[in-house]
Image (tube, rainbow, N blue to C red):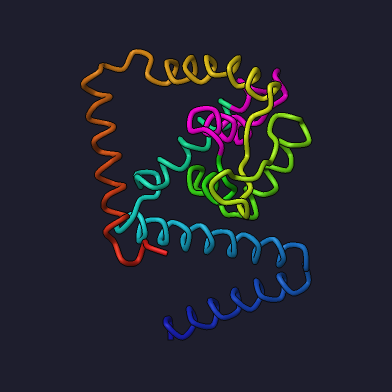
Amino acid sequence: MLIEGLKKTFKSQVHGLYMKLIENSELTKGLFNLLYEIKSVILLKNREERFCMAFDLNKCVNYISSNMTKKISEAFGRWLEKDNITRIQWIALYFIYTRGPQSQRELSMLMEINDSSTMRLIDRLERENWVSRVRSNEDRRVMKVILTDEGDALITKLLPIGEDFSQLLIKDIDPHELYIFQKVQQKMFDNIMHDSKSKK
Protein backbone atom coordinates (compact mmCIF):
# COMPACT_ATOMS: atom_id res chain seq x y z
CA MET A 1 0.00 0.00 0.00
CA LEU A 2 2.82 2.36 0.90
CA ILE A 3 4.60 1.73 -2.40
CA GLU A 4 1.41 2.22 -4.38
CA GLY A 5 0.83 5.49 -2.57
CA LEU A 6 4.29 6.71 -3.37
CA LYS A 7 3.81 5.80 -7.04
CA LYS A 8 0.57 7.76 -7.17
CA THR A 9 2.21 10.76 -5.48
CA PHE A 10 5.15 10.66 -7.89
CA LYS A 11 2.87 10.41 -10.92
CA SER A 12 0.80 13.28 -9.59
CA GLN A 13 3.92 15.45 -9.13
CA VAL A 14 5.24 14.63 -12.61
CA HIS A 15 1.86 15.38 -14.12
CA GLY A 16 1.72 18.67 -12.25
CA LEU A 17 5.14 19.67 -13.51
CA TYR A 18 4.17 18.69 -17.04
CA MET A 19 1.03 20.83 -16.89
CA LYS A 20 3.02 23.81 -15.56
CA LEU A 21 5.43 23.48 -18.46
CA ILE A 22 2.55 23.41 -20.93
CA GLU A 23 0.90 26.41 -19.31
CA ASN A 24 4.13 28.41 -19.17
CA SER A 25 5.49 28.47 -22.73
CA GLU A 26 8.43 30.74 -21.79
CA LEU A 27 9.53 28.31 -19.08
CA THR A 28 9.24 25.42 -21.52
CA LYS A 29 11.23 27.25 -24.18
CA GLY A 30 13.93 28.17 -21.67
CA LEU A 31 14.20 24.61 -20.41
CA PHE A 32 14.53 23.18 -23.91
CA ASN A 33 17.12 25.82 -24.85
CA LEU A 34 19.13 24.93 -21.75
CA LEU A 35 18.97 21.22 -22.55
CA TYR A 36 20.02 21.93 -26.16
CA GLU A 37 23.02 24.00 -25.02
CA ILE A 38 24.10 21.27 -22.59
CA LYS A 39 23.84 18.68 -25.35
CA SER A 40 25.84 20.89 -27.76
CA VAL A 41 28.62 21.41 -25.21
CA ILE A 42 28.85 17.67 -24.53
CA LEU A 43 28.96 16.84 -28.26
CA LEU A 44 31.61 19.50 -28.92
CA LYS A 45 33.74 18.27 -26.03
CA ASN A 46 33.48 14.68 -27.23
CA ARG A 47 34.36 15.75 -30.78
CA GLU A 48 37.41 17.73 -29.62
CA GLU A 49 38.65 14.87 -27.46
CA ARG A 50 38.16 12.37 -30.29
CA PHE A 51 39.99 14.41 -32.93
CA CYS A 52 42.73 15.81 -30.70
CA MET A 53 43.77 12.27 -29.90
CA ALA A 54 44.41 11.64 -33.61
CA PHE A 55 45.40 15.05 -34.99
CA ASP A 56 46.22 18.45 -33.53
CA LEU A 57 46.08 21.19 -36.18
CA ASN A 58 48.03 23.62 -33.98
CA LYS A 59 51.00 21.23 -34.08
CA CYS A 60 50.72 20.48 -37.80
CA VAL A 61 53.89 21.57 -39.66
CA ASN A 62 51.89 22.50 -42.75
CA TYR A 63 49.49 24.72 -40.78
CA ILE A 64 52.30 26.41 -38.84
CA SER A 65 54.40 26.96 -41.99
CA SER A 66 51.45 28.37 -43.95
CA ASN A 67 50.59 30.83 -41.19
CA MET A 68 54.22 31.87 -40.83
CA THR A 69 54.64 32.36 -44.60
CA LYS A 70 51.43 34.40 -44.76
CA LYS A 71 52.52 36.71 -41.93
CA ILE A 72 56.02 37.13 -43.37
CA SER A 73 54.63 37.96 -46.83
CA GLU A 74 52.19 40.50 -45.38
CA ALA A 75 54.94 42.12 -43.30
CA PHE A 76 57.29 42.46 -46.30
CA GLY A 77 54.42 43.92 -48.30
CA ARG A 78 54.01 46.61 -45.65
CA TRP A 79 57.72 47.41 -45.89
CA LEU A 80 57.21 48.14 -49.62
CA GLU A 81 54.00 50.16 -49.31
CA LYS A 82 55.69 53.58 -49.12
CA ASP A 83 57.28 52.94 -52.53
CA ASN A 84 53.89 52.00 -54.07
CA ILE A 85 54.99 48.54 -55.12
CA THR A 86 53.61 45.16 -54.09
CA ARG A 87 55.61 42.17 -52.92
CA ILE A 88 54.78 40.23 -56.12
CA GLN A 89 55.86 43.15 -58.31
CA TRP A 90 59.10 43.46 -56.33
CA ILE A 91 59.83 39.74 -56.88
CA ALA A 92 59.20 40.02 -60.63
CA LEU A 93 61.51 43.01 -60.95
CA TYR A 94 64.11 41.18 -58.85
CA PHE A 95 64.18 38.17 -61.19
CA ILE A 96 64.37 40.33 -64.33
CA TYR A 97 67.14 42.40 -62.71
CA THR A 98 69.20 39.39 -61.59
CA ARG A 99 68.45 36.96 -64.46
CA GLY A 100 68.17 39.35 -67.38
CA PRO A 101 65.30 39.50 -69.92
CA GLN A 102 62.65 36.84 -69.32
CA SER A 103 59.82 35.44 -71.37
CA GLN A 104 56.40 35.24 -69.78
CA ARG A 105 56.81 31.48 -69.38
CA GLU A 106 60.26 31.81 -67.83
CA LEU A 107 59.00 34.37 -65.34
CA SER A 108 56.06 32.10 -64.48
CA MET A 109 58.43 29.25 -63.67
CA LEU A 110 60.74 31.44 -61.61
CA MET A 111 57.87 32.87 -59.56
CA GLU A 112 55.92 29.59 -59.53
CA ILE A 113 52.65 31.18 -60.63
CA ASN A 114 50.44 30.33 -63.60
CA ASP A 115 50.85 31.96 -66.99
CA SER A 116 47.63 34.00 -66.83
CA SER A 117 48.66 35.52 -63.48
CA THR A 118 52.09 36.32 -64.92
CA MET A 119 50.54 38.00 -67.96
CA ARG A 120 48.40 40.25 -65.74
CA LEU A 121 51.43 41.01 -63.59
CA ILE A 122 53.51 42.02 -66.61
CA ASP A 123 50.65 44.20 -67.87
CA ARG A 124 50.60 46.06 -64.53
CA LEU A 125 54.38 46.47 -64.52
CA GLU A 126 54.23 47.80 -68.07
CA ARG A 127 51.54 50.33 -67.14
CA GLU A 128 53.83 51.57 -64.36
CA ASN A 129 56.60 51.91 -66.98
CA TRP A 130 58.84 49.55 -65.02
CA VAL A 131 59.16 46.94 -67.79
CA SER A 132 58.62 46.68 -71.53
CA ARG A 133 58.17 43.80 -73.97
CA VAL A 134 60.68 43.26 -76.78
CA ARG A 135 61.17 40.46 -79.31
CA SER A 136 63.84 37.90 -78.51
CA ASN A 137 66.99 38.03 -80.61
CA GLU A 138 67.14 34.21 -80.61
CA ASP A 139 63.50 33.62 -81.56
CA ARG A 140 61.49 36.50 -83.02
CA ARG A 141 58.26 34.70 -82.09
CA VAL A 142 59.09 35.04 -78.38
CA MET A 143 58.53 38.24 -76.42
CA LYS A 144 60.98 39.05 -73.64
CA VAL A 145 60.30 41.27 -70.64
CA ILE A 146 63.06 43.76 -69.88
CA LEU A 147 63.48 46.50 -67.29
CA THR A 148 63.02 50.10 -68.34
CA ASP A 149 65.40 52.72 -66.97
CA GLU A 150 62.73 53.61 -64.41
CA GLY A 151 62.24 49.96 -63.41
CA ASP A 152 66.00 49.40 -63.16
CA ALA A 153 66.37 52.44 -60.90
CA LEU A 154 63.47 51.33 -58.73
CA ILE A 155 64.64 47.76 -58.09
CA THR A 156 68.21 48.99 -57.50
CA LYS A 157 66.82 51.29 -54.83
CA LEU A 158 64.60 48.59 -53.29
CA LEU A 159 67.04 45.66 -53.22
CA PRO A 160 68.44 46.76 -49.82
CA ILE A 161 64.92 46.51 -48.38
CA GLY A 162 64.91 42.81 -49.20
CA GLU A 163 68.25 42.39 -47.46
CA ASP A 164 67.14 44.37 -44.40
CA PHE A 165 63.94 42.34 -44.11
CA SER A 166 65.89 39.10 -44.44
CA GLN A 167 68.18 40.20 -41.62
CA LEU A 168 65.16 40.98 -39.46
CA LEU A 169 63.87 37.43 -39.91
CA ILE A 170 67.09 35.84 -38.73
CA LYS A 171 67.72 38.31 -35.93
CA ASP A 172 69.01 36.59 -32.73
CA ILE A 173 69.03 33.19 -34.46
CA ASP A 174 72.24 31.20 -34.07
CA PRO A 175 73.87 30.37 -37.46
CA HIS A 176 73.81 26.66 -36.61
CA GLU A 177 70.10 26.84 -35.79
CA LEU A 178 69.49 28.61 -39.09
CA TYR A 179 71.46 25.91 -40.91
CA ILE A 180 69.37 23.17 -39.30
CA PHE A 181 66.17 25.05 -40.14
CA GLN A 182 67.18 25.31 -43.79
CA LYS A 183 68.14 21.61 -43.89
CA VAL A 184 64.78 20.61 -42.39
CA GLN A 185 62.96 22.79 -44.93
CA GLN A 186 64.85 21.13 -47.77
CA LYS A 187 64.02 17.67 -46.44
CA MET A 188 60.32 18.54 -46.21
CA PHE A 189 60.46 19.88 -49.77
CA ASP A 190 62.14 16.67 -50.96
CA ASN A 191 59.47 14.60 -49.22
CA ILE A 192 56.77 16.43 -51.16
CA MET A 193 58.63 16.14 -54.45
CA HIS A 194 58.96 12.36 -54.05
CA ASP A 195 55.36 11.81 -52.97
CA SER A 196 53.06 10.70 -55.80
CA LYS A 197 49.92 12.21 -54.22
CA SER A 198 51.59 15.63 -53.91
CA LYS A 199 52.67 15.90 -57.55
CA LYS A 200 50.60 17.63 -60.22
- Camera-nearest residue between 179 and 150: 150
- Camera-nearest residue between 141 and 173: 141
Quarter of the image where the C terminus is located:
bottom left
Quarter holding residue 61:
top left
Horizontal and vertical percent for residue 102?
A: 55, 41
Asked if the stretch drawn in magenta spans residue 95, the answer is: yes
In the figure, 184 relative to 82: above or below?
A: below
Predominant SS of the magenta segment: helix
- Camera-nearest residue between 104 and 13: 104
Residue at x-position 49% and y-position 19%: 165
Q: Is residue 24 left or right of residue 169?
A: right
**Number of residue marks:** 0
Horizontal and vertical percent for residue 154?
A: 65, 19
Q: Is residue 79 left or right of residue 27?
A: left
Asked if the stretch drawn in magenta spans residue 12, the answer is: no
Quarter holding residue 196:
bottom left
Residue at x-position 38% and y-position 14%: 171
Q: Which residues are magenta?
A: 77-101
Residue at x-position 65% and y-position 55%: 116
Horizontal and vertical percent for residue 98?
A: 49, 28
Residue at x-position 49% and y-position 82%: 7
- Camera-nearest residue between 189 and 132: 132
Quarter holding residue 1:
bottom left
